[in-house]
Image (cartoon, rainbow, N blue to C red):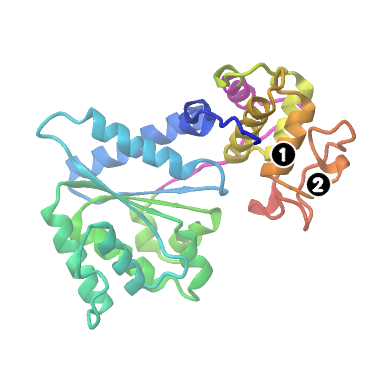
Amino acid sequence: MNTTTAQPQSSLLSNYFITTPQIEHTFARVNEIIYDTKYSGKAKGLLIRGPTGTGKSTMIKKLMKDRQQNAVDGDEFKTIYMELPSKPTTKSMGETFLETLGDPFARKHGHSAEFKLLRIIGLLKSLRTELLVFDEVQHIVEHQRNTHEASNWIKSLMNNTGLAIILLGMRNTQTILNNDQQLRRRFSATIDFDRFKVLKTSSIDFFTLLKTLEGTINVNSVSFTTNDMIQRFYYASYGLIDYLIKIIDRATYLVIQKKLEGITLEVLSEAFKDEVWSTADDNRNPFNSNFTFRSLVESNEPFHNVDGNKQ
């Protein structure tokens, strides 16, 4: 009987939180928004926008966890995190929000969008809430011809609760603020949460990230931080930390499963095909010796149309 050696969950990079200067800056800005709102009595907002895979959601969930763990007795405040439905309306957003709050009447028939919003406001006032986080906000732009209703819904929450609100989404989320000057004033702060970028020379942040990841894995490996490998990792992930971690986690698993000596280019090549692009030709696999060192942004390639494929 064949047996497979499972990778210990504790060895997965996805179980670690890797901080970066971008994350530290974002943490500081979110904490400032919470503080300013709490002590000024006026609701403020922050838009965090960027490509999928940059770690926005992971980052905000870590911040929420840290604030909860570091709270002093008697000063514990609740953070509400909600992922918007794929085709949001004011009614479906209200239902999803009420479900997040544990309301058994969240989807009760006969309750209008307005009634649900009033119920949300009432429930929030009964909770010690300091922050509302709405994720996947780009769905509003993608599935509503007019973002006016959603803008008014968000403004009503801010006006009637006085809470800090964080919007997370793709770069096109900015459209919501651009179309409503009143809302834009409330969200004067915007953070462009971008992917890592490497042009002719390696970026120090990407180098530092790879160095950290190399020091975290528990198997032998080729160096991640030679000039050649930095370029290969960049093209394989397009500077998106989610893909980077998936590739390295998979490579680690292959080493353990197959009882190999360590991570090599061949192992990384296989991991790339397993996690990113299963049909990649040799010249389009960044860890293959025949790779052409061009970004994988063509119409049939994995990073096509990632925020316009800006280099």
Distance from Cα at disc 1 to Cα at disc 2: 9 Å
Instruction: Give the mark nearest the N terminus, 1 or 2.
Output: 1
| Closer to us: 110 or 4 | 4
User: Bounds of the magenta span?
Assistant: 189-213
Q: Amino acid at mark 2?
A: Ala
Q: What residue is shown at x 69% (from left), y 45% (from top)?
A: 276
Callout 2 secondary element: loop
Residue 186: image location, x then y, percent: 33, 54
Q: Amino acid at mark 1?
A: Phe
Q: Is residue 37 left or right of residue 271?
A: left
* Residue tagged 1: 272
Q: What residue is shown at x 32% (from left), y 69% (from top)?
A: 152
Callout 1 secondary element: helix
In magenta stretch: residue 209:
yes
Q: Mark 1: give few (<14), some (14-19) or many (20+) Cα within 10 Å.
A: many
Q: Which picture quadrant has residue 266?
A: top right
Q: Which picture quadrant has residue 202?
A: top right
Residue 124: image location, x then y, percent: 18, 56
| Closer to us: 278 or 81 | 278
Residue 128: image location, x then y, percent: 15, 47
Is residue 311 in sight in this rendering? no
In magenta stretch: residue 133:
no
Q: Is residue 252 left or right of residue 158?
A: right
Which circle marks residue 222 in the picture? none
Q: What residue is shown at x 44% (from left), y 45% (from top)?
A: 57
| Closer to us: 261 or 248 | 261
Find out whether the residues at labels 1 and 2 contact each other: C-beta distance under 8 Å. Answer: yes
* Residue tagged 2: 280
Residue 102: image location, x then y, percent: 22, 59
